[in-house]
Amino acid sequence: INGQQESMVVKPQETSDGVEYFLCTVGDKQITQVRKEQADTWEQMWGDLDDEDVNAIGKEITKQK
């Protein structure tokens, strides 16, 4: 995040209409929520991260699945 390596806890969640998204937490602070779009891009639903950080998080989520 912002050019620094950080440990992050990522928890899958689901919207009421069944769309998967991920809650991302560093320490005890929730920093963002992201979801994968149809075109294999990642969108930030909530948070202040730039596109590069959002895509880096998404790439790691994809690797872990």
Image (tube, rainbow, N blue to C red):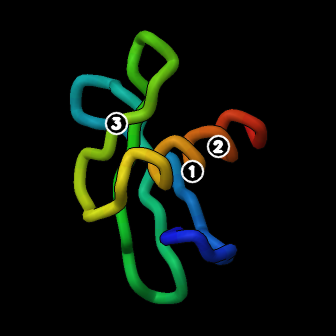
Q: Position of residue 34 (x, y in %)?
A: 39, 45
The disc at residue 36 is none
Question: Which mark is first along the chain, 3 or 1?
Answer: 3
Number of marks in picture: 3
Residue type beneath disc 3 = Glu
The disc at residue 57 is 1
Question: Which mark is first along the chain, 2 or 3?
Answer: 3
- Secondary structure under tag 1 reads helix
Q: Is residue 6 left or right of residue 27?
A: right
The alpha-carbon separation of the residues under discs 1 and 3 comes to 10 Å
Q: Which residue is mark 2?
A: 61
Closer to the camera: disc 3 or disc 2? 3
Q: Position of residue 49 (x, y in %)?
A: 35, 60
Q: Tell me if residue 63 comes above or below residue 5 in the rendering.
A: above
Residue type beneath disc 2 = Ile
Q: Which residue is drawn at the image coordinates 22% and 33% (left, top)?
A: 16
Q: Is residue 57 left or right of residue 33?
A: right
Determine contact: label 1, label 3, CB under 8 Å: no
Closer to the camera: disc 2 or disc 1? 1
Q: Quadrant of the C terminus?
A: top right
Determine contact: label 2, label 1, CB under 8 Å: yes
Determine the image quadrant of residue 15. Answer: top left
- Secondary structure under tag 2 reads helix
- Secondary structure under tag 3 reads strand
Q: Foreground residue, 11 or 49?
A: 49
Q: Which residue is mark 3?
A: 43
